[in-house]
Image (cartoon, rainbow, N blue to C red):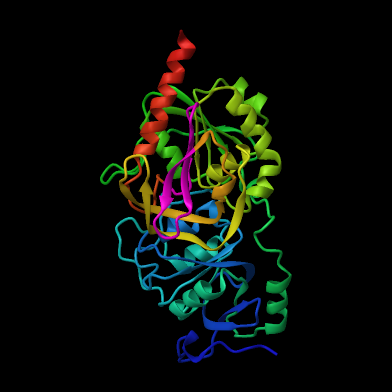
Amino acid sequence: MIKKAKKNSSKKFTHFPTGVLVLENKVVFKGIGIGYQGSATGEVCFNTSLTGYQEIISDPSYAGQIINFTFPHIGNVGTNKEDHESDRIWTKGVIFNTEITNPSNYRSLKKLDAWLKKHKIVGITGLDTRSLTNFIRDKGAPKGTICNNNKGNFNLKKLTNNSVKWPGLKGLDLAQTVTTKKKYIWQGFKTWKKEKGFEKTKKKIHKIIAIDYGIKKNILRYFSNFNCDVIVVPCNLQAEEIVKLKPDGIFLSNGPGDPAATGRYAINIIQKLMKANIPIFGICLGHQLLALALKAKTKKMKLGHRGANHPVKNLINNKVEITSQNHGFEIINKNLPKNVVVTHKSLFDDCIEGIKLKNKPVFSVQYHPESNPGPQDSHYLFNQFINEVKKNAKKKRH
């Protein structure tokens, strides 16, 4: 028997619903289908960001997930060709509260609905996103199936079964799905500036090897801001091959899935790279994998952190940073070895947001200092890494 969602769980419609979200516990949310006609199954999460929906949807870290946007006005600035965080969109589906309006932005090239169709992303609008968010807060991030059918024909039993049978993110290695299949050199585009767009770096000084677990383009742009020559490599490229490229620094990228699953091959690679005494910087999944390589443990969170308003305390200088976050796993505090220092903590739930080694230029953060979207409080971390890279490059010359 399919349970109906509470009365306030969906908007009233002037015509029949053409979109549904069916959760694993048989709760059904109804709305108006948008984007791609079809269905998709994944973990249903919520994001509290007020801006940057195109960057969020195109972030590879959302592979295997259906995003419920808590901000009601999504789509009002359209989409463009410049704000993609990856060449392929891995997000399973999107949920909006309010009907998508015509875009009003000088950079807009395509309406969001058309953009979703192009990238085969199933969506629903007209849903009570607050009710769904409260459901997730109470019960944790559920498995769900989103479906868009312009005739309003839904096999709810089949959609429920799809949700129940989907294995979930725990134990799932998605890095090998989203990673580049072969190494490539980043084109050298810098971060976007008004009136100038994306400028190219004119000189490349320091060589950075970026291990791609699902890397965002804005991270690569930040390295270009520092005149870095960035080579992006597959997530399973062996440490010996990486060292042969003679990097001045190594970056462990963000990405989707369970870090313990990706760690089955990534841990050994990272441990060997640490022995090579090359500066290492990790973000998000890269942060979790570094911790695993240091013999720590990770666990699945009930809700995860997703949004651009998360306060984090820097334990080194006692300053608070407002950060952009997207993660559903965290490091377990009690398993940290003695040579690891916790540098940042969440002011929401006290989870570990940053670590560093005491005796080596190796550090990482759980959140996204490259923002896009989000605040720019944490850009100093790139400076910190590049300073270590410069020291390493100087040693190599002498």
Q: Who is closer to the viewer here, 206 or 326?
A: 326
Please tell me how many numbered marks the rendered image carries. 0
168 above or below 287? Answer: below
373 above or below 5? Answer: above
Is 367 inside the magenta-drawn segment? yes
Seen in the image, is 320 located left or right of residue 215? left
Q: Who is closer to the viewer here, 163 or 340?
A: 340
Q: Residue furthest top?
A: 398
| Residue at 50% from the left image edge and 26% from the top image edge | 360
| Residue at 32% from the left image edge and 50% from the top image edge | 320
Residue 142: give x, y in percent of width and height: 60, 71
| Residue at 65% from the left image edge and 33% from the top image edge | 269
Residue 373, picture quadrant:
bottom left
Quarter of the N terminus within the rendering = bottom right
181 above or below 11? Answer: above
Magenta stretch bounds: 341-368
Residue 247: give x, y in percent of width and height: 53, 23
Q: Who is closer to the viewer here, 353 or 239?
A: 353
163 above or below 224? Answer: below
Residue 25: give x, y in percent of width and height: 65, 79
Residue 48, picture quadrant:
bottom left
Seen in the image, is 101 located left or right of residue 113? left
* Residue 189 visible (yes or no): no
